[in-house]
Amino acid sequence: MAQQDCNLTIRGKVIHAENTEPIESAYIWIIESEIGTVSDFNGLFRFSNLCPGIYTIKIQYLGHQDYFEKLEISNNSNYTFRMIAEDIALDGVEIHGHQDALLTTNSVSSIYGEVLRSARGQSLGESLKKIPGVNTYSSGSTIQKPVIHGLHSNRILILNNGVRLEGQQWGADHAPEIDPFIANEISVVKGAETVRFGADAMGGVILVNPAPLPVKAIKKGEIDLIGFSNGLGLNGAASFTGGSEKIKGLGYRLQGSSKIAGNIQTPDYMLANTGVQELNFSGAIGYSRSRLGTELYVSNFRTTIGILPDSHTGNLSDLESIIENGRPFRETGFSYDIQNPKQEVDHQLVKAKIHYHLNDGSKLNFQYSFQRNHRQEFDRRRGEFNNRASLDMVLFTNSIDLSYNHQTRKNWDGVLGAQVMQQANSNIPGTGVIPLIPNFDMLNLGIYAIEKFTNGPLELEGGLRFDSRQVAAARIIRGDLQERDFTLNNFSAFFGGVYALSKNFTFNSTLASAWRPPNINEQFSQGLHHGLAAIEIGNPDFESEQSFKWLNTLNYTGNSLNIELTAYANRIDNYIYLNPTEEQFVSLRGTFNVFEYLQTDANFLGTDLSAIWNVSSRWEVFSRGSIVRAKNLIEDSYLPFIPADRLETGVSYQITSFASKNNTKFSISNLAVARQNREPDFDLAPAPPGYQLWNLSAQTSVNLGKNKLNMGLYANNVLNEVYKDYMNRFRYFTHELGRNVLIKFNYEF
């Protein structure tokens, strides 16, 4: 009799049946073999070296019914196990009923735990640079927007605690109005997700998720204190989470953060008026039982950001001189004062959510959200006008999301949904300046359906969506009323799959069609954008963008080596981009570069690589890099503001004390960014040279009874390298940030 080949592997994912959220720390046994394991943060587990045969799987998780299933194993297989919550009141039972996991066949990368904690104190865009394929598009060193595979702004959707963030996100100087301290996990979906979320998810999705609210009587909190040398800044945050002792299932959270920093410094000089001030808070309360879950969430984000005065020149000669010089002419000292030019942004969000579980395991969801975004941009002006904003806009957004999630015991699950979003933008009178964009009203209606099939090592998923958008815009220019109405309709669709090739390899592939209607600024900009000190000119006759993206990811997971390789091709017809021209606009208020919105057909090709090698129990080597190639197909030229090739490599050493349960970790890394040699035919200045940065970090944790103190020391740009980044709109006037030393304290109680 031939000997059996006992090298089979089964992979599994354990999720809550009520909301498909992954379950961490579930116990999984194979009864016949008496072997067991525990699911990880994403609900994943694996058994290797199995012989062909029939096995009984048993899964246990506190507060849920024990799960049993017989599996016939003849090849490498992949399964999803859904656990049903028990409607009993036991101490320790915690049903996470408010935070739905995004289960998608698209490539998803996340930062959480120690990695997320080490990124605290940075902007959202800067934090996400730890994920290959993600970059930033910036205006100076204090304003940064995430870039995914070369796309940014209104092509990237940010979900803040399940609500699509709606602000004035069309400008390079408009950073997302979000407090990263609220996050327990930040995930990036690199593929188009327009079917799930609508047109703004054309380039990808960023999910900023807080921890689920507790449903048992607990009390815990967290305090962060961060100081940094460049800008002599201080960043602090605190949160407190609790559950009611009297009302089972009732939980709440209060959170707040603040930040103050002064003028930042390049390796050779100080940058005037580059301070920042921030004050944010949020609160949530929720109630969850076996069938019903509710949540109310409110937040306020407020920031004041100084703008480099040298970006606002007084005449054509000064403009040409500072671009030629490549740095400010004026010397300045350190100050916390923020003068004009500056930005003041205030953003409020209110979310009310309810879901109900039906007898067949399906679920009904309803969510309403309201957002108010007030943006003011101040220029240097004479007399009383210096205290008036040059750009003063208020954007109101109301959104309703309805969905029905259905599932069968094994193979099929899906969702049917409808979304309604209404917006109104108003320019506040009294600025004395013609508004850059008009007042407008927008109504967007969307309906969609997504189905997912799981069978052994294979997962297949497909979806279809229809959107209808109506926009009415109006403004007065030199006494004339200008009005324009638009109605835009379009379909989007996707089909994707995940296949476990072997016990170590999985392969994801997704093909998606997506669309994006032209944004109001791309259509109507006809003046000075104060935050960028540039004239922007739009075109109301633009057509909607239409993209076709094919995304493929190969993942290898071994005992000591993890590798993820992503490759993609994205064809975008009617691609809209902001292009520098050879013109300057001269007025009594100064001389400004002229940028024009143009439309073309474009190709985006690229690849991302991430690798982690655990050389031993203490030594780890990591590497992550990305390449983007973008081409203007009509002009047979290159597109502006596309990230250059980049590669970050590093090594870390970890000391673990099992007696005290303390961890200490030291890391050194090198970031190498190439020169962007694929420049458009015209730019205000040549692309800067490539550069390399060295970074150091040390982290440790100390247990203080039941509490824990995490400490970190970080040094970025240790060698104080003088450099410019191609993706910075202010590279024409200044260099990037010099050495920056940060010290971080995180206290968990």
Image (cartoon, grey):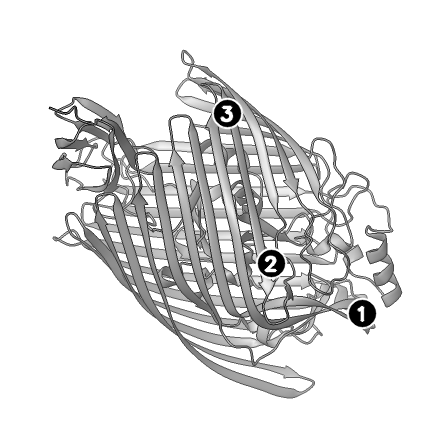
Work out how far the residue at label 3 is from the one at label 1, CA to CA, in angstroms: 55 Å
First reached walking from the N terminus: tag 1 or tag 2: 2
Marks 3 and 1 in Cβ contact (< 8 Å): no
Q: Position of residue 611 (x, y in %)?
A: 48, 35
Residue type marked 1: Arg
First reached walking from the N terminus: tag 2 or tag 3: 2
Q: Nearer the viewer, mark 1 or mark 2?
A: 2
| Mark 3 lies on residue | 620
Q: Nearer the viewer, mark 3 or mark 1?
A: 3
Q: Position of residue 292 (x, y in %)?
A: 21, 51
The secondary structure type at the circle numbered 2 is loop
Is 638 rendered above or below residue 469?
above
| Mark 2 lies on residue | 174
Along the line of sight, the residue nearer the viewer: 711 or 342: 711
Number of numbered discs present? 3
Q: Position of residue 694 (x, y in %)?
A: 66, 32
Residue shown at 14%/37% (left/top)? 71
Residue shown at 33%/63% (left/top)? 401
Q: Is residue 209 visible?
A: no
Residue at the extreme bottom of the image, as rendered: 480
| Mark 1 lies on residue | 589
Residue type marked 2: His
Residue type marked 3: Glu
Question: For residue 129, what is the image quadrant?
Answer: top right
Within-10-Å neighbours for mark 3: few <14, some 14–19, many 20+: some
Is 46 rendered above or below residue 577?
above
Q: Position of residue 232 (x, y in %)?
A: 70, 36
Along the line of sight, the residue nearer the viewer: 393 or 16: 16
The secondary structure type at the circle numbered 1 is loop
